[in-house]
Every structure is written in structure tokens, then in C-alpha cells.
């Protein structure tokens, strides 16, 4: 177990030593997608960041129960209980049942997560599957005096809650200012206070998804699902709660309030937030219309794109930024990531071909220590990538014979690269996993060998130069010909 993992806690606004409540077990809850439309690349960044955290906790020896929900009901267009139901609106638009919408976009989300080679969470609960738990929780909040009913809708009483608890614990904002800012919204006369939010919303006769409750037919508010499901699967107090930074001010603030009002416990010890993927400095979002779909990026079929980029290039691009920094999308940055990722994969493909010497000139332990120190420093993946490039440099210099490595150090180099590139980062080698390309190149290399043996140098050169032009480099040695991407 790596005892010295420091992670940034949004609640304390500083890095803290990670001490799980019940080591080696770790409970981690991450707010999942709202499955009324395709996930965009910004959403993917958040889930890829938490996949990195999940993977590194496992690498460190923890037994992680990772719960990531699917929001499949109760999400209105506005954050504050106004606007249309996103699922109902989409269902009408696509002329489908709401649950057909949910199924369609859940499957699409899973496909995207698989393409990015992220690990599935341990539990993936849905809001619609936990309406009973949400109703039970609302009943407790009412019994404890922190919620009230207005004509079949239940509101959380923020003012009452904030007399005992800190409603702005995540954001450090001034409650008075917040009240002043929300004053403009108006039209919410049912609520006693302007910051109050709905736990349960009364259904209209035409509401497509509605359930029976002690307060009549209705549906749960968005925030209550995560409080109910995290408590059900991780307990009233668990280790890590995460999501994108945009969720901190409302959704997570309200989650904390609900859990404290229900069970008097702050639900999570560490709150972690990933920063936003931006396009020309503006947050990527569905509503801003700048939300790239992963498929558009892979094919290059988007007006802002010069060409397509492979899923692992895109993932590598994301890992090159720290999860708490904003990451701005650009063709140039993706081009650089494509080159960097290829350089790393090239080194990986050379690893089996490296030959150890009796006496080596290089030690690998410091590299592993640097990688672990970087990850222990709030999951600093860009620093790990710099160390992996150093590992790649060692591979290349051993391969070209300018550096000697002992058998023991060569073993360490291979496991280091394997552990961090594949296990912790969850990257995969798209070239070598492409068996068809391998087979075709084996055939082309065999044809070139025949041509050379027949002294048909025009053909053998044509093959070599032709491959070079499409970025494939042939290397001849006494053991035969190998290829790599240049
Ligand atoms: P949603 O499906 O809108 O509920 O979002 C799913 C997750 O993606 C949430 O954790 C959001 O905070 C996160 N998210 C949304 N937009 C972005 C973005 N541009 N960059 C990073 N994460 C985002
Ligand atoms: Zn949530």
C-alpha cells in the first residue's frame, strides 16, 4: 500500500494525506452521465480522469468499490427545478419512449468508455432503479425538519439547514451573495427560500415518467438520486466523491446538504473535482454547441478538425494535462499528442527486442520512484508522462547500442512501462492490436525480401519508400526486417 498518497480535497482546498476510512477498502462515488443524449468529449475527460484515479488506487493496493451512477430520470433543464424534463423532451423529439432514450444513450456511453479503454465501475446504479430509496431519504429529511411540502412537491429548506451546517462548504461562497444572485430568477413562489431546491416534484398528468409517493404522483429531483445511491452502496460515510467542477456549486453542494440533513453525516471525506475541457477557452458543453462527439474526433468529421485522431491519441492528450487544470482543445495540441503517443508506443514495441548486456550503465528504480511520487502528488499524470519519455529514450539508446542495460534492469524497464502505460493510464497499443495491419505488413516485408533476393532492387526500394511515405519505417538487421511508425 502506498501510504503517502496526497490528494486535493475541494472541502479543505488543499492537498491531504489519503487515509481511507476502512483501508484497504476504498469507496468512491462519481456522478455519471445524464443519458438523454450522446456524451461529448468534455464528459469523457471527467470519466477518464476518474478512471485514472480508480486505476492508480488499485495499483497502490486498495480494494476499490467504484460506484458511478446513470442519471436516467429527474434531470430538468435548469439547475434549480425549472425547465422541461430532459428525457421527456428528447423522447418527444425522437418519438421514442423515455426508457428507449435511456437505453440508447446508456449503450452509446458504454461503447465510448470501452473505446477509451476505461474500466467499468464496480456498480452502475440508475436513478429509476432507486426511487424507493430516494423516497425513504426524503421522508427522513422531512422528519428531521429540513424539508417541507407545497402541493405535492417537496423542497429542501436551505435556510434552516444553514443555521446548523455550512451550505457553501464546497465553494466557500458567501450565502448572502448567493441569495442576492438568485433573487432575479423569480417565479418560484412555491418555495419558502430562493435557494431551496426540490427533492420530489409533483407530476403533471402528461408527465411521462412518474411514480407513487406519500405526496402523490411525482418524480425525484436530480440531486437526491446521488445521495440515496451513494449511501446505499458505500454507506453514510465513504471516502471519495467526485465529478466535474461544474457540479460543485449546485449538485454536490445539495448532495452534502441532503446527506447531512438525513443522517447528520458529511457523506464523503474527500471531494474531488476534475476541470473542464474547453474549446477556445469556452467550456465544452451540449448547450454551447461546441461539444465534440468522440466519433467526430476519431473520424475528423467536424468543421473545427483538420483530421481524425485515434482514441488513444485523444486519451493521451487528456493525460498530458493534470486533472485539475483546464485543458483547451486544439488541432496543434492533438498533433503533438499523436507524435508523443507514437513515440511511446514505438519504444514499447522495441522492448521485446532489447538485448541485455552483462554489465549495465542505467538504473530503472529512480524512474519508478519518480512515477509513483508524481501519482502520489494528486495524480500528476503529466509528470509521469515526462518520466515515460525518459524510459522511451533509454529503450531507443539501448536498441541502437549506445547504452548498455543489465538483465535485471531490463526486466524493471519492461515492467515499469507496462505498469504505467497500460495498467495505470489504461492506454493500449492501437498499432500492434491491429492484427490485420500486422498481417499485411508481414506479407509486404516478405515480398520485399523476395525482391531483394532476386536482385530486384527497384521493387524493394519502391516498397520501402512507399511505406515511408505513409509513416511506416522499415529497419533491416541480421535477424530480419521490423517495422515501426515514424
Ligand atoms: P452530464 O451528463 O452533463 O451530467 O455530465 C457528466 C459529467 O461530465 C459531469 O461530471 C460533468 O461535470 C462533466 N462535464 C461536463 N462538461 C464537461 C467539460 N467540458 N469538461 C469536463 N467535464 C465535463
Ligand atoms: Zn451526482
Image (cartoon, rainbow, N blue to C red):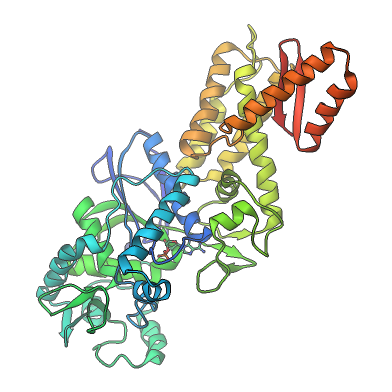
Q: Position of residue 449 (x, y in %)?
A: 78, 16
Q: Can you say which quadrant of the picture contains the C terminus? A: top right
Residue 16 appears anywhere in the view: yes
Q: Residue at x 64, y 49 (%)?
A: 309
Q: Residue at x 12, y 79 (%)?
A: 215
**For residue 107, above or below residue 100:** above
Q: Position of residue 49 (x, y in %)?
A: 47, 50
**For residue 209, above or below residue 205:** above
For residue 393, which quarter of the picture?
A: top right
Residue 172 appears anywhere in the view: no
Count of labels in the image:
0
Name the foreground residue: 331 vs 424. Answer: 331
Q: Residue at x 56, y 32 (%)?
A: 433
Residue 391 as seen in the image, left or right of residue 448 = left
Name the foreground residue: 348 vs 275. Answer: 348
For residue 348, which quarter of the picture?
A: top right
**For residue 272, above or below residue 132:** above
Residue 468 as seen in the image, left or right of residue 211 = right
Residue 56 as seen in the image, left or right of residue 413 = left
Q: Residue at x 50, y 40 (%)?
A: 425
Q: Position of residue 253 (x, y in %)?
A: 33, 69
Q: Can you say which quadrant of the picture contains the N terminus? A: top left
Q: Position of residue 444 (x, y in %)?
A: 73, 24
Taking the image in four quarters, ligand 2 sits in the one at bottom left
For residue 54, which quarter of the picture?
A: top left
Amino acid at each position: 500500500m502506498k501510504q503517502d498518497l496526497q490528494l486535493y480535497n475541494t472541502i479543505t482546498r488543499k492537498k491531504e494525506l489519503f487515509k481511507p476510512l476502512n483501508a484497504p477498502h476504498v469507496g468512491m462515488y462519481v456522478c455519471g452521465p445524464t443519458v438523454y443524449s450522446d456524451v461529448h468529449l468534455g464528459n469523457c475527460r471527467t470519466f477518464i480522469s476518474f478512471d485514472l484515479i480508480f486505476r492508480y488506487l488499485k495499483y497502490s493496493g486498495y480494494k476499490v468499490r467504484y460506484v458511478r451512477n446513470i442519471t436516467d430520470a429527474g434531470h430538468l433543464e435548469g439547475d434549480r427545478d425549472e425547465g422541461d424534463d430532459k428525457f421527456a423532451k428528447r423522447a418527444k423529439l425522437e418519438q421514442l419512449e423515455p426508457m428507449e432514450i435511456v437505453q440508447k444513450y446508456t449503450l452509446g456511453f458504454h461503447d465510448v468508455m470501452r473505446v477509451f479503454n476505461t474500466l467499468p465501475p464496480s456498480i452502475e446504479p440508475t436513478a429509476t432503479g432507486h426511487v424507493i430509496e430516494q423516497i425513504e431519504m426524503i421522508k427522513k429529511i422531512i422528519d428531521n425538519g429540513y424539508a417541507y411540502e407545497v402541493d405535492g412537491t417537496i423542497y429542501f429548506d436551505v435556510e434552516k439547514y444553514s443555521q446548523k451546517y455550512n451550505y457553501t462548504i464546497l465553494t466557500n461562497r458567501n450565502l448572502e451573495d448567493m441569495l442576492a444572485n438568485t433573487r432575479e430568477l423569480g417565479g418560484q413562489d412555491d418555495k419558502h427560500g430562493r435557494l431551496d431546491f426540490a427533492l420530489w416534484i409533483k407530476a403533471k398528468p402528461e408527465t411521462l415518467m412518474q411514480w407513487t409517493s406519500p405526496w402523490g404522483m411525482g418524480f425525484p429531483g436530480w440531486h437526491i438520486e446521488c445521495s440515496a445511491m451513494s449511501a446505499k452502496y458505500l454507506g453514510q460515510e465513504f471516502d471519495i466523491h467526485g465529478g466535474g467542477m461544474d457540479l460543485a456549486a449546485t449538485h454536490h453542494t445539495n448532495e452534502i446538504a441532503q446527506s447531512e440533513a438525513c443522517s447528520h453525516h458529511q457523506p464523503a471525506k474527500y471531494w474531488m473535482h476534475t476541470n473542464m475541457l474547453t474549446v477556445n477557452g469556452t467550456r465544452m458543453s451540449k448547450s454551447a454547441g461546441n461539444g465534440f462527439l468522440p466519433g467526430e474526433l476519431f473520424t475528423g468529421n467536424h468543421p473545427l478538425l483538420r483530421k481524425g485522431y485515434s482514441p488513444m491519441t485523444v486519451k493521451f492528450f487528456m493525460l498530458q494535462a493534470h486533472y485539475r487544470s483546464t485543458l483547451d482543445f486544439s488541432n496543434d495540441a492533438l498533433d503533438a499528442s499523436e507524435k508523443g503517443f507514437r513515440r511511446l508506443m514505438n519504444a514499447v514495441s522495441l522492448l521485446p527486442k532489447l538485448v541485455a548486456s552483462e554489465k549495465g550503465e542505467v538504473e530503472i528504480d529512480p524512474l519508478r520512484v519518480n512515477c509513483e511520487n508524481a501519482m502520489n502528488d494528486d495524480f500528476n499524470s503529466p509528470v509521469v508522462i515526462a518520466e515515460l519519455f525518459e524510459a522511451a529514450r533509454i529503450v531507443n539508446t539501448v536498441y541502437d547500442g549506445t547504452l548498455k542495460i543489465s538483465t535485471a534492469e531490463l526486466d524493471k524497464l519492461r515492467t515499469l512501462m507496462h505498469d504505467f502505460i497500460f495498467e495505470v493510464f489504461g492506454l493500449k497499443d492501437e498499432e500492434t492490436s491491429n492484427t490485420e495491419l500486422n498481417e499485411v505488413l508481414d506479407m509486404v516485408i516478405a515480398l520485399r525480401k523476395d525482391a531483394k533476393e532476386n536482385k530486384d532492387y527497384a521493387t524493394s526500394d519502391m516498397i520501402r519508400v512507399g511505406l515511408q511515405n505513409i509513416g511506416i519505417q522499415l529497419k533491416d538487421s541480421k535477424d530480419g526486417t521490423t517495422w515501426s511508425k515514424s
